Image (cartoon, rainbow, N blue to C red):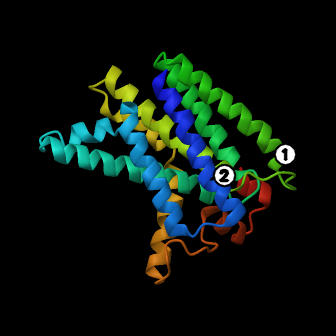
Amino acid sequence: DNQLLYVLIFSIFFFLIGFIDDIYTIKPFPKLILQIFCSFSVWLFCNDLHFNLLEKIFFNNFPGEIIIIMGLLITAVWISGVTNAINWTDGLDGLASGVSIIILINLFFIFLTLNEIQLANYSIVLAGSCYGFFLQNYKPAKIIMGDGGSYFLGFNLASLCLIASNKFFIQYPSERFLSLLPLFLLIIPIVDMSLVIFTRIRNLKSPFYPDRNHLHHKLLKKGFSYKKTLI
């Protein structure tokens, strides 16, 4: 299946961006540019990674060129945004892999419902891989995923949720709300990232400025144990 092949190929590109950053440390802005460039390439090569639902709802009456440009921009923001959101959850041992397991299991059942067996198999294989990693990453961590691992997972989650949304829209065009459900699987990482960026900007700091304002940091500050915060 071409769509799955493209997801695999570009997930390797995103992994390499993170892996090089792990070794040599790339500054945030050049790293973001690389992610956006890869996201543009994804949009160019894979029709299933377009925001078809939003284009039909909000831009259907616009000229064709506007629809193309807006679709490209929204897709790039979605893929790079979700990739970084998953990366930012990797601030607690087992958190990024644990969140990914939950989302991927949900995607497995969604793809089964849509009779997309290859995508269902791919989702459950990723979930199993994350579980194996989680057992070794649980505190005290014996291994860590680094930016390479979190970018790989982030891109896969962004892509699979978008593909699931598009498949829903194709099979059930009248059920627009159902078509949005796969995207809402990522609501907690996205809201966490959005609030952190807003707080940094409000405090006149760079959106890339590292701090301890993430949800898991706030739960730890409230007195939750590591295990309860993770759950």
Counting other residues with Cα less than 10 Å from the Cα at mark 2, is it few (<14), some (14-19), or many (20 or more)? many
Residue at numbered disc 2 = 148
Q: Look at the picture and state if 183 lies above or below 80.
A: above
Q: Looking at the picture, how far across and down is residue 17, in whole percent?
A: 59, 54
Residue at x-position 49% and y-position 61%: 32
Q: Amino acid at mark 1?
A: Gln
Q: Secondary structure at mark 2?
A: helix
Q: Look at the picture and state if 85 lies above or below 167.
A: below
* Residue nearest the observer in this picture, 173 or 13: 13
Residue at x-position 62% and y-position 48%: 15
Q: Amino acid at mark 2?
A: Gly
Horizontal relation, residue 229 to residue 114: left or right: right
* Residue nearest the observer in this picture, 222 or 97: 97
Q: Secondary structure at mark 1?
A: helix
Are the residues tagged 2 and 1 within 8 Å (C-beta)?
no
Marking on residue 136: 1
Q: Look at the picture and state if 42 lies above or below 140.
A: above
Residue at x-position 85% and y-position 54%: 141
Q: Quadrant of residue 100?
A: top right
* Res. 15 in view: yes
